[in-house]
Amino acid sequence: MQSMIQMKAKAFAQQCQWQVICSGVGSFAFNNKWLDGFMRRKNLSNRRCTTVAQYLPDDLVEKQQEFLSYIIYRRIQYDYPLAYIGNMNEIPVSFDLPSNTTIDELDARSVSIRTTGHEKANFTVVLTCMADGTKLLPLIIFKLKNVT
């Protein structure tokens, strides 16, 4: 975001109207020190999008222990080899990865970030590993649309 401010300032400096108003602005170096001063004068700062966090359940450790005991019991009961026990996770990956930072006023309580509107368009990556340590190849799933 900060580099965009510097690029825009350089583009303005090349315009004739600004060169008439401020002589020598065409050769000005819009460096990081200038940017820091500009942001301070305009009361701007780097901001992150404000989000609502999710909380873990209170009985999480108990649920984990209960699940682990169940798996160990079944493994002993049916004599499963470790290579037959797996753990998988599906992870949505967005085609459009918007930045989660923007430049806004210092005192702003709510910070919004403009996006392209396609941040919900995603595909799924499935990662799997077996209990014996073997990692399986990732599986990628794309959503298909039926065109009639």
Image (cartoon, rainbow, N blue to C red):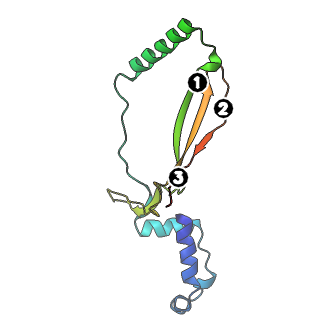
| CB-based contact (under 8 Å), mark 2 and mark 1 | yes
Under circle 2, the secondary element is loop
- Decide which of 23, 131 is in the foreground and name it: 131
Which mark sits nearer the N-terminus, 1 or 3?
1
Where residue 148 appears, x then y in whole percent? 49, 61
**Which residue does the image show at 56% across and 26% down from the upper left?**
87
Which residue in the rendered view is the most extreme toward the top?
77
- Label placed on residue 144: 3
Where's residue 76, x and y in %?
55, 7
Which residue is found at the position 42% from the left and 15% from the top? 66
Q: Are marks 2 and 3 in contact (CB under 8 Å)?
A: no
Q: What residue did someone put label 1 on?
A: 86
Q: Horizontal placement of 4 versus 107: left or right? A: right
With respect to residue 47, does 125 lie above or below?
above
Residue in the foreground of this view, choosing between 40 and 129: 129
Circle 2 residue: 136
Spot occupied by residue 70 in the image (x, y as percentages of width and height): 46, 13
Q: Nearer the viewer, mark 1 or mark 3?
A: 3
Which residue type does callout 2 highlight?
Leu
**Amino acid type at mark 3:** Leu
Residue visible at 66% across and 29% down in the picture: 135
